């Protein structure tokens, strides 16, 4: 199925291998196991770093938040992205925000789609200058089904207004992921809401690189390193 008409800013991203992530972000406990992936989509399980009893841990979570009140049932709302402007009061995200359930989603890059003059959605791969692995700000939640026998942990990416490069590349959206500086990882996870929110800034466009890639990225079953290769 070709889903290109449904895709927008950062609905697909690239996960580095586990060793690279653990070199980038210090962990006390690693309860996860994963390999590099090049076409990660919403509703899939992704690696996440969070605090538990004051210590960092790496776990796997469903991308697309399911709040506690949903009783384990995915909502019909846009649960994969929490906008900085509304997350404090949005029904899906406010519980996670005010309970300091903040997390980091490690990435090597993400995809954006440009609507061309011919009305074709051209995918682009976006990466950072001199940061082959980086952390994106997220929120997480835990919920149980009605019977209480199934616990689901899930997450959402925090988004901020896009920079001029992203406005050009992804010309149908004005959003981009909230990319954290390496020195801000600890404060995002453990700081007060005021300090944490102050870290959520638009990443500078001169610190990002992008190039067009094959429309194969639109097929969810395709997942190999050639997906991030530039096309002419």
Image: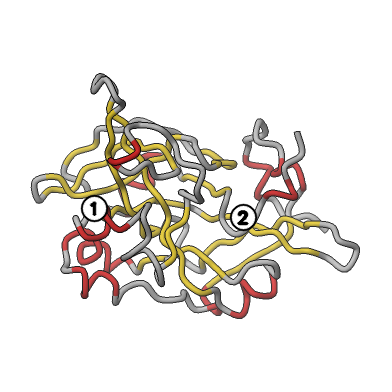
Q: What residue do we see at 18% from left, 48% from top?
A: 56
Residue 220 as seen in the image, left or right of residue 75:
right
Residue 41, given in percent of the width and then of the height, sits at 55, 41
Quadrant of the image for the N terminus? top right
Q: Earlier in the sequence, mark 2 or mark 1?
A: 1
Above or below 31: residue 54: below
Q: Are marks 2 and 1 in contact (CB under 8 Å)?
A: no
User: CA–CA distance between discs 2 and 1?
Assistant: 26 Å
Q: Which residue occupies the extreme left position in the image?
A: 53
Residue 136, given in percent of the width and then of the height, sits at 40, 59
Asked which quadrant contains residue 18, the reply is top left
Q: How many marks?
A: 2
| Residue where numbered disc 1 is placed | 101
Q: Which mark is residue 111?
A: 2
Q: What residue do we see at 51% from left, 69% from top?
A: 129
Quadrant of the image for the C terminus? bottom right
Q: Nearer the viewer, residue 92 or 136?
A: 92
Asked which quadrant contains residue 19, the reply is top left
């Amino acid at each position: 199925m070709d889903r290109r008409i449904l895709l927008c800013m950062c609905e697909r991203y690239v996960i580095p291998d586990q060793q690279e992530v653990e070199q980038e972000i210090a962990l006390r406990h690693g309860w996860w196991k994963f390999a590099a992936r090049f076409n990660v989509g919403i509703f899939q399980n992704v690696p996440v770093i969070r605090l538990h009893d004051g210590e960092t841990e790496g776990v796997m979570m469903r991308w697309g938040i399911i709040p506690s009140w949903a009783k384990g049932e995915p909502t019909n709302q846009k649960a994969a992205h929490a906008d900085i402007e509304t997350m404090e009061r949005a029904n899906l995200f406010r519980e996670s925000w005010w309970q300091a359930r903040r997390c980091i989603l490690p990435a090597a890059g993400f995809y954006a789609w440009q609507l061309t003059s011919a009305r074709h959605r051209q995918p682009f791969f976006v990466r950072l200058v001199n940061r082959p692995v980086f952390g994106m700000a997220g929120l997480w939640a835990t919920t149980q089904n009605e019977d209480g026998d199934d616990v689901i942990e899930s997450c959402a990416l925090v988004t901020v207004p896009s920079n001029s490069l992203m406005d050009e590349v992804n010309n149908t959206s004005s959003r981009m992921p909230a990319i954290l500086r390496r020195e801000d990882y600890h404060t995002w996870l453990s700081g007060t809401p005021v300090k944490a929110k102050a870290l959520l800034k638009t990443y500078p466009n001169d610190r990002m690189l992008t190039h067009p890639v094959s429309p194969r990225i639109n097929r969810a079953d395709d997942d190999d390193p050639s997906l991030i290769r530039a096309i002419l």
